[in-house]
Amino acid sequence: MEIKQLIVGPLLTNCYILISDEEAVVIDPGAGLKKILKEIEGKKLNYIILTHYHWDHTLGAQKLKEKTGAKILIHKGEKDFIKFQPDQFLDGGEEIRVGNEYLKIIHTPGHTKGSICILGENFIFTGDTIFEDGVGRTDLPGGSEEDLKKSLEKLEKIIKKGMKIYPGHGESFEK
């Protein structure tokens, strides 16, 4: 799987483009519509996956959907916080196909009620749950210190040594 990282918007949010067999998924298109469209040119964009509801991760999703017809996916825990209609609410545990590869949705509440991580083969997208130098804040609506602690314990069992971690802000890193 090819993974491209774009830094978008005023909060320098990481937007990721995953490509496999001419199919693509975009994770957290907070801005940068023209850059994203250029990177997926010639590919079929199937899904726009949002790791949580904060505007710096979701702002460009609706316009990207209008341009490509891709489906917007977000966890059902974000239902009360979003101002748009996604195509599918996630529960956690789903497998999303991209070309001939699969991504698994892991519900990791704490930063928000519906925060998710997206697990691939030897890599994981953590949104604002985990960064290289810390974890996501819990003081915004839907955040919970207790839930974040449980999510970190869950991720500790999933993230293996040598796995590449792609956070919502900052540099990617290995465990």
Image (cartoon, rainbow, N blue to C red):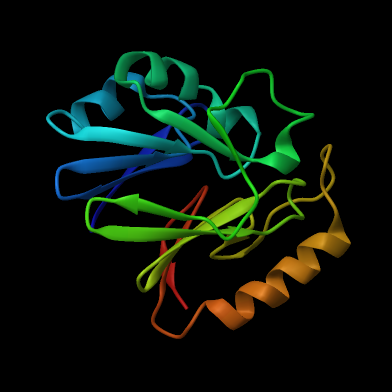
Q: Residue furthest left?
A: 42
Residue 23 at x, y = what percent? 22, 42
Disc tally is: 0
The answer to whether residue 164 is visible is yes
Q: Is residue 37 left or right of residue 169?
A: left
Q: Is residue 127 left or right of residue 38?
A: right
The answer to whether residue 11 is visible is no
Q: Residue at x 48, y 37 (%)?
A: 12
Q: Quarter-wise, where is residue 134 in the image?
A: bottom right
Residue 42 at x, y = what percent? 12, 30
Q: Quarter-wise, where is residue 1 in the image?
A: bottom left
Tell me if residue 60 comes above or below residue 169 in the rendering. Answer: above
Q: Residue at x 43, y 57 (%)?
A: 171
Q: Nearer the viewer, residue 14 or 85?
A: 85
Residue 66 at x, y = what percent? 38, 13
Q: Nearer the viewer, residue 13 or 141?
A: 141
Residue 99 at x, y = what percent? 23, 51
Q: Residue furthest bottom?
A: 161
Q: Is residue 12 left or right of residue 140?
A: left
Tell me if residue 163 comes above or below residue 25 in the rendering. Answer: below
Q: Residue at x 68, y 59 (%)?
A: 108
Q: Nearer the viewer, residue 7 or 98?
A: 98
Q: Residue at x 57, y 60 (%)?
A: 93
